[in-house]
Image (cartoon, helix red, strand yellow):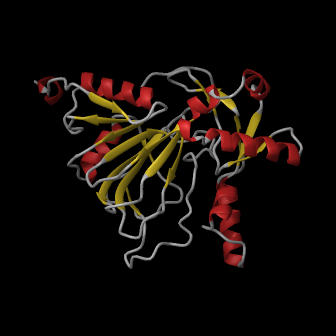
């Protein structure tokens, strides 16, 4: 008899974080999920967009195995600190000397929306996190779409947003244009990731729900509009998309595990701490191209 067959379905204790999105799931060991229980977890992932599991005991291989149940793992183009387990990275926050990085201004973003097919999601596992601070905030693209007026929804339908990898790096302070080496780095980034276009309004590939598909970091223009028109409308939409009623906030504790659906949320890590922040991270690959309307199951 297989190990999966021996496992008994586990009842999910789901506790929503806010009315917009996010939930904590208690009483579950993610290493011991039979297929029926995992199907329930996956449905909760689609329903709540952000899931948190507390008190999980995981090594690198077990962390990767959990991720692989959601799909293929993908390489991160800009993250150093690969672990020995394929697809798993060590993810560091404030430096060891306790001084907060002046360039640590990650801000609101969607992972890899500057690519043709952005990440399905990401998973973090807390190894050593600050006693206070370092929370992660999320905002729902579903809710931001629903919050638009009918006239604005109609106006945005069919409009195209431009996503640019360089914009975020320059605005966040992670890159500069002050040296020839810096310019060569930016040129290499541009060659690897040319500007990408995605619809401002699209449907989630699995839930079929409509979303306002923008994010503060990478969405830089609206195709076909004059620069001043594009900036004014996009600035308004970005501010709208991050209203507090569309958000949830996750507080970290050691041994917490979190997964989010990158296709329908923006996220922002708070840089309000000086202690060590050390996690495992992996990204989930997706073949979905925003704007493609086919609905696929997992």
Name which residue lies at 63% across and 67% down.
173
Asked whether residue 88 appears in the rendered view, the answer is: no
Q: Residue at x 27, y 55 (%)?
A: 254
* Relative image position of residue 80 (x, y in whole percent): 46, 64
Q: Classify 59 as above or below 10.
A: below
Q: x, y (%) of residue 154?
A: 76, 22
Q: Is residue 117 shown left or right of residue 261?
A: right
**Location of residue 180 by image quarter:** bottom right
Left or right: 106 in relation to 196: left
In the drawing, does residue 274 fall left or right of residue 266? left
Q: Toward the viewer: 272 or 82? A: 272
Please name the residue shown 31% across and 54% down the image.
126
Quadrant of residue 143 within the rendered picture? top right
- In this rendering, does residue 286 appear at all? yes
Q: Nearer the viewer, residue 285 or 18?
A: 18
Count of picture labels:
0
In the picture, which quadrant includes the C terminus?
A: top left
Q: Is residue 59 depicted above or below 45 in this figure? A: below
Drawn side of residue 254 relative to residue 46, left or right:
left
């Amino acid at each position: 008899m297989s190990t999966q067959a021996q496992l008994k379905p586990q009842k999910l204790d789901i506790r929503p974080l806010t009315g917009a999105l996010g939930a904590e799931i208690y009483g579950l060991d993610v290493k011991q999920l039979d297929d029926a229980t995992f199907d329930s977890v996956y449905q909760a992932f689609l329903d709540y967009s952000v899931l948190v599991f507390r008190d999980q005991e995981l090594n690198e291989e077990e962390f990767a195995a959990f991720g692989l149940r959601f799909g293929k793992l993908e390489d991160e183009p800009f993250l150093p600190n690969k672990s020995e387990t394929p697809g798993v990275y060590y993810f560091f926050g404030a430096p060891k000397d306790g001084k907060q990085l002046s360039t640590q201004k990650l801000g609101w973003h969607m992972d890899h929306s500057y690519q043709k097919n952005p990440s399905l999601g990401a998973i973090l596992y807390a190894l050593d996190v600050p006693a206070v601070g370092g929370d992660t905030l999320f905002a729902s693209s579903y809710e931001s779409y629903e919050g638009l007026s009918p006239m604005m929804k109609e106006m945005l339908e069919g409009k195209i947003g431009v996503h640019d990898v360089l914009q975020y790096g320059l605005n966040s302070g992670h890159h500069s244009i002050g040296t020839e080496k810096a310019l060569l780095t930016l040129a290499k980034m541009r060659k690897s990731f040319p500007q990408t276009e995605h619809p401002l309004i699209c449907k989630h590939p699995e839930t079929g729900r409509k979303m306002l598909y923008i994010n503060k970091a990478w969405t830089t223009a609206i195709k076909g509009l004059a620069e001043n028109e594009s900036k004014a409308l996009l600035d308004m939409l970005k501010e709208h998309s991050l209203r507090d009623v569309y958000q949830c906030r996750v507080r970290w504790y050691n041994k917490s595990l979190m997964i989010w659906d990158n296709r329908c949320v923006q996220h922002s890590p708070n840089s309000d701490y000086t202690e060590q922040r050390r996690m495992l991270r992996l990204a989930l690959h997706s073949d979905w191209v925003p704007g493609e309307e086919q609905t696929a199951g997992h």
